[in-house]
Amino acid sequence: MVEMDLIFGHFARRKLSTLDAELLDEYDMLLKQLDSDLFRWLIVGEKAPDDVENSKCYHALKDFIANERTELLGNY
């Protein structure tokens, strides 16, 4: 899904170098999720499964999207 590629790519360019090993592992776990699920969780606001919801990186990504939403998604 193009939207998820844009979001994860932008996040990686801005934040990846600041993530510690634990957050990098969590980032990798997020990348293995289905794009359609990620879109529903991150953009639509559906609740993610507990293993995702308990991830620090997931919350960092949600905060990043909230702060960069217009740049990332326009007026969606």
Image (spheres, rainbow, N blue to C red):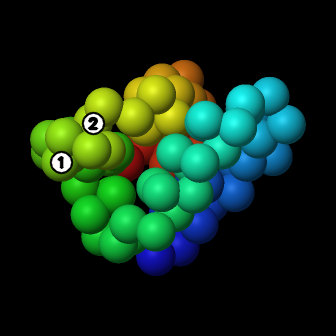
**In this orientation, which residue lies closer to the viewer: 76 or 6?**
6
Residue drawn where x is 35% and y is 72% of the image: 34
Q: Is residue 62 visible?
A: no
Q: Is residue 11 left or right of residue 65?
A: right
Judged from the image, the secondary structure of the residue bearing numbered disc 1 is loop
Q: Which residue is mark 1?
A: 49
Determine contact: label 2, label 1, CB under 8 Å.
Answer: yes
**In this orientation, which residue lies closer to the viewer: 63 or 51?**
51
Crowding at mark 1 (Cα within 10 Å: few <14, some 14-19, many 20+): few
Q: Is residue 19 left or right of residue 5?
A: right
- Looking at the image, which residue sits at the far front? 21
Crowding at mark 2 (Cα within 10 Å: few <14, some 14-19, many 20+): few
Q: Is residue 44 left or right of residue 65?
A: left
Residue drawn where x is 73% and y is 32% of the image: 19
* Rendered view: 53 above or below 1: above
Location of residue 41 in the rendering, given as x and y in whole percent from the top left corner: 26, 48
Location of residue 46 by image quarter: top left
Q: Which residue is mark 2?
A: 53
Location of residue 45 in the rendering, given as x and y in whole percent from the top left corner: 20, 40
Residue drawn where x is 31% and y is 31% of the image: 54
Q: Amino acid at mark 2?
A: Glu
User: Alpha-carbon distance for marks 2 and 1?
Assistant: 6 Å
Q: Amino acid at mark 1?
A: Pro
